[in-house]
C-alpha cells in the first residue's frame, strides 16, 4: 500500500508496532517457557505483563486518532518468524544452562531494542502529525522498554557474577 502523507505513514508505523508488540508478547511467553532459572523466568513473565499493557496503550492511540490498525506487512511477519525459528534452533544447540539463560536474555534484549527504535520514530511522527496525546502514550511505552532493557542488563550481570563466584568457590 503506497503511503501518501505523514498521517498514513504514522498509521502504518503504529500498525507495525502494534503487530510487533502482539507477536513479541507471544515470543516472550515462548522464551519464558524455555527458561529454567526462576529469576530469568520471572523477568520474562514480567515482560509479557508489560507488553500486554503496552498493547492496550497502542490500541488507545488508535482510538484517539480515530483509525484502525492496518494489515501488517507480510515481510515484517516473515522477519519475526525467522527470528523465532533461529532462536529455537540456536537455543537447542546450547548445552550449558548458564549459557542458555544468557542467550535467552540477550535475544529478549535484542527484541526490545528493535521496539525502542520504532517508538522513537513513532513519537516524532506523532508530534509532526499533531497527535500530542498519542505521543505521550508512546513515550510511556518507550519508557517501559528502556526500563526493561536496563533490568535485563542487570540480570545478565547478576548471572555472570553469580557464576564467577560459584566457579571461584568450587576451585577453592
Image (tube, rainbow, N blue to C red):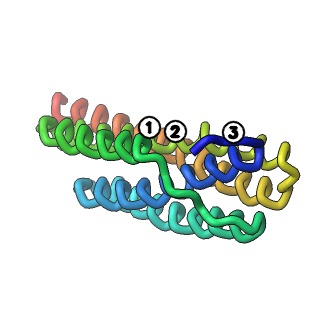
Location of residue 97 with respect to 62 vertically, above or below: above
Residue visible at 40% across and 63% down? Answer: 45
Which residue is tagged 1? 110
Q: Quadrant of residue 63?
A: bottom right
x and y, in percent, of residue 157 in the image: 43, 37
Labels 1 & 2 near each other (Cβ < 8 A) = yes
The residue to which callout 3 is attached is: 121
Visible residue check, residue 64: yes
The residue where tag 2 is placed is: 114
Choose mark 2 or mark 3, whichever is in front. 3
For marks 1 and 2, give the one nearer the viewer: 2
Q: Are marks 1 and 3 in contact (CB under 8 Å)?
A: no
| The C terminus, quarter of image | top left
Ranked by sequence position, the earlier of labels 2 and 3 is: 2
- Horizontal side of residue 151 vs 107, given as left or right: right
How many numbered discs sit on the rendered protein?
Answer: 3
Classify mark 3: helix, strand or loop. Answer: helix
Amino acid at each position: 500500500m503506497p503511503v501518501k502523507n505523514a498521517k498514513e505513514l504514522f498509521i502504518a508505523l503504529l500498525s507495525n508496532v502494534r503487530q510487533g508488540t502482539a507477536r513479541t508478547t507471544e515470543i516472550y511467553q515462548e522464551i519464558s517457557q524455555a527458561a529454567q532459572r526462576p529469576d530469568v523466568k520471572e523477568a520474562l513473565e514480567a515482560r509479557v505483563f508489560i507488553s500486554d499493557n503496552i498493547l492496550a496503550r497502542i490500541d488507545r492511540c488508535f482510538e484517539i486518532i480515530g483509525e484502525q490498525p492496518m494489515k501488517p506487512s507480510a515481510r515484517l511477519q516473515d522477519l519475526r518468524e525467522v527470528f523465532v525459528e533461529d532462536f529455537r534452533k540456536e537455543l537447542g544447540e546450547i548445552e550449558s544452562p548458564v549459557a542458555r539463560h544468557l542467550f535467552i536474555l540477550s535475544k529478549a534484549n535484542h527484541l526490545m531494542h528493535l521496539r525502542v527504535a520504532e517508538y522513537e520514530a513513532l513519537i516524532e511522527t506523532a508530534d509532526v502529525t499533531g497527535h500530542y496525546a498519542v505521543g505521550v502514550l508512546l513515550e510511556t511505552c518507550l519508557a517501559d522498554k528502556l526500563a526493561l532493557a536496563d533490568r535485563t542488563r542487570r540480570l545478565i550481570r547478576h548471572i555472570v557474577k553469580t557464576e564467577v563466584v560459584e566457579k571461584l568457590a568450587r576451585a577453592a
